[in-house]
Image (spheres, rainbow, N blue to C red):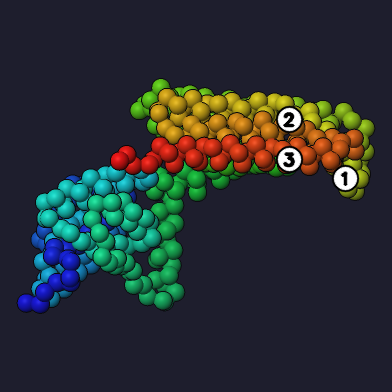
Amino acid sequence: MSRGPPGTSNVLVVCVDRDDDIGRKAQISTPVVGRNECIDAGVKLAVADPEEADANTIFAAVKQFDELSLKGYKCQVCVVSGSLSGGFEADQKLRAQVAEVVRMSNSDGAILVSDGVEDETVLPVLLSIVPITSVRRVIIKHSKSVEESYVVFGRYLRMLAFDPRYSRWALGVPGMILFTVGPLAYFNLLQEASGVFAAILGLALLVRAFDVDKLFSGLPRLRPSNFIRLFSILASLLIVIASIIQGYAAITILPEFQQVSREPSLMLQYGSFLIGVLLSKSIDFIWIGLAIYFGGNLLYHFLRGSLRVLQSVVGILVLALLYFPFQQFSLILQGVGSTQLLISSVLFGLAITFAAVGLIYQYIRSRRKPRV
């Protein structure tokens, strides 16, 4: 037998299934350790879903194990899985399983076998437990014929239709738009239909941007601090939307707005003035809404004892320092502001922000210094 690589006396071949297809489709608990056990798991997963790429990845891991064993390496093979929800929960589950297998096999090096870029995002998690000496990525071969291209395309369409991670956005948002816009279009209310389309799409983007859907889906297991964050997000959204509506209502009574409504070509002449009025009429409530959001974040991180509370403090400070520049900018758009005041306030705010961030950075570094 040939000897293994220097410094690696026991190699662990790790097959990663980050979204837990093996558990959801084949009802197999992980970690699965051992050559025969992994083959059995791969067969069960392939029978449950013959098109599942993770089954091929399991067999690729077994093949890697066999090749290393023939070359004289002392090794072990295992299959670990994460969670359908992904993110922190999946990575923590993977980390715990890999740590358990490493402890059982006394491995001092690992080979990661993965079926894609998403699984390889767990590299930092695995590296915190065992050195990764190699990464093998398994790519499933497909025929280039038109017929099989349609099969592959149909597979992804089914994923968009039936996988909850994608269907609620790929089908839910367009379905809501068609359900509301369709009747309006039938009654020749196309102008109102375009407004409804924009409102639904904007709401979907806001929900995704602020992870509101995740907050609602996790309500049963939320800590009290999470409700503070949820309230601050929803309250800030409502206040910002209401302030924009108030600003729009303020400009609709202006004679310049009436002229632009009659002659859209005058938008170039009066557009900056109208935007300045809208901003000046809504800026106070917009800043109040943003302050509620940052304040909720500050209290949330404070209750959790997280250093991110400092991030929220900086956010509130920057928000306060930007109030006067934005107010001055709205006056400039209306033709009554001062460019010198705007530049001076921006430079002053920038200096204060740099000083605050520098102090916070030094504080964090002092907290992280190892004690002698």
Between discs 1 and 3, the one toward the N terminus: 1
What's the CA distance linking mark 2 and mark 1? 22 Å
List x then y, in percent, for residue 180: 61, 37
Instruction: Name the residue that disc number 3 marks.
Output: 346
- Asked if one can make out residue 244 in the rendered structure from this viewpoint, the answer is no
Element assignment for label 3 = helix
List x then y, in percent, for residue 144: 41, 76
Q: Residue at x 44, y 63 (%)?
A: 153
Q: Residue at x 29, y 55 (%)?
A: 127
Q: Residues within 10 Å of mark 1 (few under 14, many from 20)?
A: some
Specify the quadrant of the image occupied by residue 175.
top right
What's the CA distance linking mark 1 and mark 3? 29 Å
Q: Nearer the viewer, residue 188 or 36?
A: 36
What's the CA distance linking mark 2 and mark 3? 17 Å
Element assignment for label 2 = helix
Q: Residues within 10 Å of mark 3 (few under 14, many from 20)?
A: some
Instruction: Name the residue that disc number 2 marks.
Output: 283
Q: Which mark is residue 267?
A: 1
